[in-house]
Image: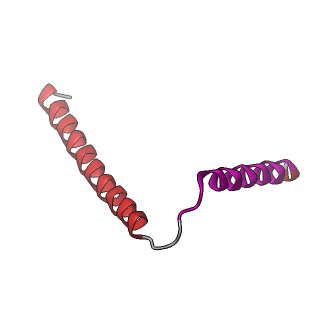
Amino acid sequence: MRTSNRITEIHAGLRALDREETALSAILRQRVQEALNDPRPAIPAEQVLADLRAYHAERIRAAKRGA
């Protein structure tokens, strides 16, 4: 493959990555704004962590049962 073709492909790949990053950033900004606009009361961090630990423990138990 010629060097100019490789450079063209690299540039195309970088442009594709830039487009993907832009799209993902827009999605993230939208989700953060939705969370900030959510009128429901905040959940304390301790409760979130406890729920995550329980969820994770259940997933581990289920995986062991299926093994």
Specify the farthest residue to the right: 65
The colour scheme applied to this rendered structure is secondary structure
Q: Is residue 52 magenta?
A: yes
> Residue 55: x percent and y percent?
72, 55
- Residue 20 located left or right of residue 61: left
Residue 9 quadrant: top left
Which residue is rendered at x = 35% and y = 63% of the image?
33
Along the viewing direction, whichever of 56 and 63 lies nearer the viewer: 56
Measured as percent of width and height from the top left, residue 1 is found at 21, 29
Residue drawn 67% across and 52% down? Answer: 52
Residue at 16 percent of width and 27 percent of height: 2
Q: Is residue 46 above or below residue 3?
A: below
In this picture, residue 61 sits left or right of residue 19: right
Q: Quadrant of residue 13?
A: top left
Kindly report the secondary structure that dominates the magenta region of the rendered protein.
Answer: helix
Q: Residue at x 53, y 69 (%)?
A: 41
43 lies above or below 59: below
Tell me where the magenta segment starts and ends, as one range: 42-64
Q: Nearer the viewer, residue 2 or 23?
A: 23
Residue 27, position in %: x, y?
Answer: 34, 60
Magenta stretch holds residue 63: yes
Determine whether 48 is above or below 4 in the image: below
Count of marks placed on residues: 0
User: Which residue sits furthest bottom?
Assistant: 39
Q: State the image coordinates of residue 46 (x, y, percent, origin top left).
A: 65, 51
Which residue in the rendered view is the most extreme toward the top?
Answer: 3
| Left or right: 7, with 24 as reference point | left
Q: Nearer the viewer, residue 65 or 6?
A: 65
Horizontally, residue 22 falls left or right of residue 38, namely: left
